[in-house]
Amino acid sequence: MFTIEKFLTQTHEDILIWTIDVLKERNCKIVQVLNAGNYNVDFCELLDTFISSNGGNYFQVHDKQAIKNKLNHIFLDVAWELCTKKILRPTTYNLSRSGTSAVNSCYSLTQPGIDWLKNRNQIEKFLSPTRLETLFFELKAKF
């Protein structure tokens, strides 16, 4: 269980790793489509789950709000990073002409993202900021 201070010291990397673990757990077997306009990842729900799964339900309402305010931008940055890596997209999972409005906290897994989540061995290389360096190092012997 986290203390308020522990919640407030969570980093982008902490949240990214947690989010990937949750997405793998929820979506490797089957892509579940949420009610809100055919999305399958809701970052507001992920934020609430993160807080409650780490003991946040025991805090006062104003403390939970302070935690949400602090972590909100980190969760949005994680969502954007996963979009730039083509794991998520900020559109619906299925095409539709139903005119549903986009909710800014909802995203969809891409097919490459679903495939990537199933392949646990590629995660570290895929997310590593030094991926290019690693690739060059692997070719070192050839040069």
Image (cartoon, helix red, strand yellow):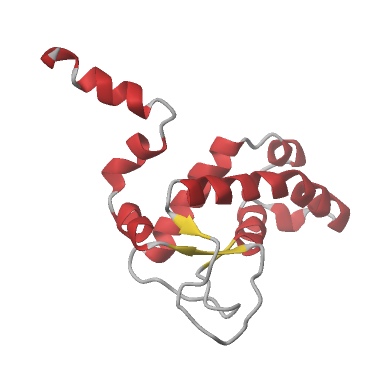
Q: Residue at x 35, y 60 (%)?
A: 114
Q: Residue 2 location in percent, x, y?
A: 67, 43
Q: Viewed as shown, does residue 20 lie left or right of 74?
A: left
In the displayed structure, would residue 9 be above or below residue 50?
A: above
User: In which quadrant is the C terminus drawn?
Assistant: top left
In the displayed structure, would residue 127 be above or below residue 55?
A: above
Q: Viewed as shown, does residue 98 lie left or right of 141?
A: right
Q: Residue 81 location in percent, x, y?
A: 53, 45
Q: Residue furthest bottom?
A: 98
Q: Nearer the viewer, residue 47 or 63?
A: 47
Q: Viewed as shown, does residue 13 lie left or right of 25?
A: right
Q: Residue at x 35, y 63 (%)?
A: 111
In the displayed structure, would residue 91 be above or below residue 6?
A: below
Q: Nearer the viewer, residue 135 or 15?
A: 135
Residue 1 visible in the picture:
no
How many labels, in total? Answer: 0
Q: Nearer the viewer, residue 136 or 47?
A: 136
Q: Residue furthest front?
A: 97
Q: Viewed as shown, does residue 7 lie left or right of 21?
A: right
Q: Residue 6 location in percent, x, y?
A: 69, 37
Q: Residue furthest left?
A: 142
In the displayed structure, would residue 138 be above or below residue 59?
A: above
Residue 8 visible in the picture:
yes
Q: Residue at x 11, y 16 (%)?
A: 142
